[in-house]
Image: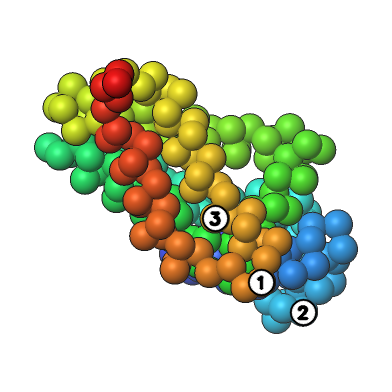
Amino acid sequence: MRTVDPAKHQARKRHIVDAATVLFATKGFERTTTAEICKAAGMSAGNLFHYFPNKRAVFLAVFEGDRDDKAERLVQARSAEDPWRALLEVVDLLAAPAAEPLAPPLVMEAMVQAYRDPELEAVLSRSNAEEHATVAALIRKAAAAGQVDPGLDPDGAASWVLAMVASLYTSAAGDPAFEPAEQLPTLRLILRRFLCAGPKESS
């Protein structure tokens, strides 16, 4: 019986996912065929199915690949000594992929497919829940440390923070001239003014 090298097996799966990611981002899930994935990955259909049972499994793998690393960094952020700095670092972490050409259209495609695929919706929901919980926890800690307006509801504020991060992806997907990396300083400024503004004095 042939022994499978786990490292080589994982690297081969990563190669397939990387090749398919380009197709999914540029053509969409529905219009991407298994034959096109095989061609892009340089392998036969039989070889592809050795790693993934179908096209849908490849698409799911695109969004599960870096989840463990991101989850670990979110956990680390929650225990940071400076919650405000940690919050900005989390925003940078979540916003950084928006600057990659394939990420915005891929995110938009995932949103479309999630309405039709409960398993994908569950994957995205788990990721969103982890992000929301981390941002809310950091806002709560920053408020306790006097770094954030204590009058804000942490959960509601976290939803707005994540909505602003998401806008980088939707704007980039809809406008080729939009540069997420260039807009990140503006996003930071908006967040600072939103989160750190204290109650106004009545005149």
Q: What residue appears at the point 49 percent right and 34 percent down from the top-left corner?
A: 160
In the image, what residue type sits under mark 1?
Pro
Q: Secondary structure at mark 2?
A: helix
Nearer to us in this view, 2 or 173: 173
**Distance from the alpha carbon under mark 2 to that under mark 1:** 28 Å
Q: Is residue 149 left or right of residue 131?
A: left
Which one is nearer the viewer's eye here, 105 or 56?
105
- Seen at 72% across and 78% down, the residue is 40
Residue at label 2?
39
- Establish if 107 lies above or below 40: above
Distance of mark 1 from mark 3, alpha carbons? 12 Å
Q: Is residue 196 above or below residue 144?
A: below
Q: Circle 1 is placed at which residue position?
A: 176
Mark 2 near mark 3, Cβ–Cβ under 8 Å? no
Query: Residue 189: x, y in percent?
Result: 35, 51
Q: Amino acid at mark 2?
A: Lys
Q: Residues within 10 Å of mark 3 (few under 14, many from 20)?
A: many
Q: Are marks 2 and 1 in contact (CB under 8 Å)?
A: no
Quarter of the image that includes the N terminus? bottom right
What is the total number of numbered labels drawn onto the structure image? 3
Which residue in the structure is indicated by mark 3? 168
Few, some or many residues within 10 Å of mark 1 (<14, 14–19, 20+)? few
**Of label 1 and label 3, which has the lower sequence position?**
3
**Among the two numbered marks 2 and 3 on one chain, the one whose residue lies closer to the N terminus:** 2
Q: Amino acid at mark 3?
A: Leu
Q: How is the image coloured?
A: rainbow
Q: CA distance from mark 2 to mark 3?
A: 32 Å
